[in-house]
Amino acid sequence: MNRTSLPSTALRAGPSTALRAGYCCALLSCLLVPTLAEAEPHVFSLHGGHFFGPGPIVPDTPLPDGSIRGISFDLATLQGVAAFAEGGRKLSDGKTTANANIDAGALEIGGKSEVKGKAAGKTEGKTFWLYAVAGGPNEGRERYHFDANYNMIWTVDIGLDPGFSEGIVRVDKFELTTGTRKVPASLQTAAKQPGGYDKAGSLASGSTLVGRVGDFDADGFMDGTIVATANVPMQADLLPGAPVANQRGFSTDVPIDPLFALELTLHGIVNMRPLVKENLTGGHLDQLTERVKDIHERLRAARANYEAGFIATPPSRRAELAEIRWKLESIRQMIFIPMAFLTTYPFPSGNAPGSVVDATSRAFDKAQSLAAMLEKRRGGHPPGARERENKKRAGEKK
């Protein structure tokens, strides 16, 4: 099975086709999760996607496939780290060392740009190497955790090397997420100064990238899409202050319980609520349509997760899943309403705007309720909740 995790239509053939190979994996994952958390180091595979920018550089750069090895990851705590391995490349400054466990590949950045001055020509059609580098606060490691909204966060110190030392761009604590990120303005614009580029390739500042995490190909292993935005540091030689962005798919060999994958998918849908509200109130119909299509696709994956969970559940306990089934189907039916208005019927006309607002609001409420029910069912709690409560109690004692 192709395990790409960028949005696809792989499940259109229906659960019976798309899940046949994944059912066994799902069953095994339920049995193996407790033992694999501390077993062999895991591997995350990176799939396609694009790097946007820096600044005005276009076209957007297709990202090569890559891999991250030497990962310890525990689904019980939703935390992990990719260890630093010696033997990685030296950057063109001759001293900065890359983590040999992380292969992010070479980027062929830029066919043309609006860059002026001393940087003109240096960014056009150049090969940049992207590395996780030592010498920063993460010491060459890449760290993983989930935030309170169940977005997976990847944190790493990166170096972008064009082949000459003065052109190296370093960003410490570069953060990628399966949640959402807006392309920032240039640092110059943020400081109310002239000379900044308020774009990252084809994306204008203010554009939103959306990630996801769960099990979207129904093979029993965690996968998703990561996104990131940042600014080139002002001390950099090339395009200081310019925004950059990144979006790519990933798959892993971390086994995940299908009902937990369903829960993560629902959390991801709930996290899109502010974006949908922003699109609705701003009248951005193209963006709204894309968001609703995305939610519809996620719900297909959620249905696939449910069916895998149903098969993995002993027959004597399957009746317990009935409420999950009908609640999930209720969400799916509710999202059909905005899908119909936005993709089939004229909009906005008649009562269409009110119907879309009402249906999407109900769908989000139902998704939040079902996610909370699944969280309670597995005896879980939001990531970091216990740590925050302990800090609060410690503060009260002081």
Image (tube, helix red, strand yellow):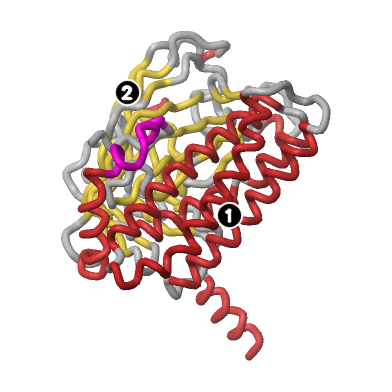
Q: Quadrant of residue 334?
A: top right
Q: CA distance from mark 2 to mark 1?
A: 48 Å
**Would residue 310 be counted in the magenta stretch?**
no
Q: Amino acid at mark 1?
A: Ala
Q: Quadrant of residue 124?
A: top left
Q: Which residue is mark 2?
A: 163
Q: Residue at x 30, y 41 (%)?
A: 16
Front label number (2 vs 1): 1
Q: Which residue is mark 1?
A: 367
Q: Residue at x 30, y 65 (%)?
A: 313
**Chain part drawn in magenta:** 8-19
Q: Residue at x 31, y 64 (%)?
A: 74
Asked if labels 1 and 2 touch by Cβ distance under 8 angstroms, the answer is no
**Depth check: 68 or 114 in front?**
68
Nearer-N-terminus badge (2/1): 2
Label 1 secondary element: helix
Measured as percent of width and height from the top left, residue 5 is found at: 36, 37
| Image quadrant in which the N terminus is located | top left
Measured as percent of width and height from the top left, residue 305 is found at: 38, 51
Residue 195's label in the rendered image is: none
Q: Amino acid at mark 2?
A: Gly
Quick check: 286 above or below 261? above
Measured as percent of width and height from the top left, residue 87 is found at: 16, 44
Total tally of numbered discs in the picture: 2
Label 2 secondary element: loop
